[in-house]
Amino acid sequence: MMNKVVKKLTAFGLVAVAALGLMACGSANAASGDSESGSSASNNGYRTLDEIKEDGTINIGVFSDKAPFGYVDENGEYTGYDVYFANRLAEDLGVDVNFVSTEAASRVEYLQTGKVDIILANFTVTDERAEQVDFALPYMNVALGVVSHEDNVITDLDQIGEDDQVIVISGTTAETYLTENYPEIQLQKFDTYAAAKSAFENGTGVAWANDNTEVIAFANENEGYTVGIESLGDTDTIAAAVTKGNDTLLQWINEEIESLASENFFHKDYEETLLDTYGADYEETLVVEGGKVAE
């Protein structure tokens, strides 16, 4: 009887030791992972230019569902205007690029938490955002626009009734602009471009407010819709953004943008990725070359 008890206790002890060993191993792996994450980023939560070069990979946040600026094509590859630029940045930096799919509302968070080194996701420059991230030189002009159903074209926001809804994407300048300037308009907010597009196509909202580049693209690619307001509010710019204080990476991006002007890079980018959507008439209006916005 005693032998059986001893055997059971011994077996139990071995199991317990094994379990403790696994727990210790798991803790060590977790600690190792945290350590590795810490070594890949500075104490400020970002990786400097030299750290990115040493690692050999740059993490760039882009949209995955917002054609023609950032989306995944039928071959599973990231493509679009922002992606074209991102690939060139990585090429000239001499590193591989890791694309990180982002939504509009998470762009600032992804920089602040070190999930990405750069955001290239149709990011409009605003004073409020500039307090949270550092913007590079601009590479595109943008204003807000409003698309509506062709049987009820909205050409003025005063046409929108008190029971009507306007679709916006959370975290965009359209949401901010309408909230501040037209608080009486009911907003139907969505987290993703795909969700907003689907809801609008299924009859939600009398209109959809977004960057004019995006609503124009939507109307051009989908029958039954008209951009009744092509420009709403001020004309702004689109720019790459880095984590606040990441001066070495920011300076390199700015120098790169200025250098790319010698080959009309952003005009080539437009012609490769946007021409089919917007045509030649919009090229000079939208493209900013070398970081210099036309007066």
Image (tube, grey):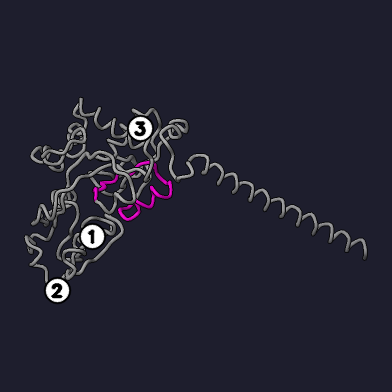
Comparing 237 with 121, the one in front is 237
Can you tell which quarter of the image residue 186 is in? bottom left
- Residue labelled with disc 2: 162
- The structure residue drawn at horizontal position 47% and vertical position 31%, both measured from the top left corner, is 54
- Residue labelled with disc 1: 176
Q: Earlier in the sequence, mark 2 or mark 1?
A: 2
Badge 3 element:
helix
Residue 273 lies, in percent from the top left, at: 21, 38
In this image, 184 relative to 191: left or right?
Answer: left
In this image, 170 relative to 156: left or right?
Answer: right
User: Hey, what amino acid is under mark 2?
Assistant: Glu
User: Hey, what amino acid is under mark 3?
Assistant: Ala
- Residue labelled with disc 3: 90
User: Hey, what amino acid is under mark 1?
Assistant: Thr
- The residues bearing labels 2 and 3 have C-alpha atoms spaced at a distance of 49 Å
Residue numbers of the magenta segment: 103-126
Asked whether 111 falls inside the magenta stretch, the response is yes
Instruction: For the N terminus, give its image quadrant.
Output: bottom right
Residue 23 lies, in percent from the top left, at: 67, 53
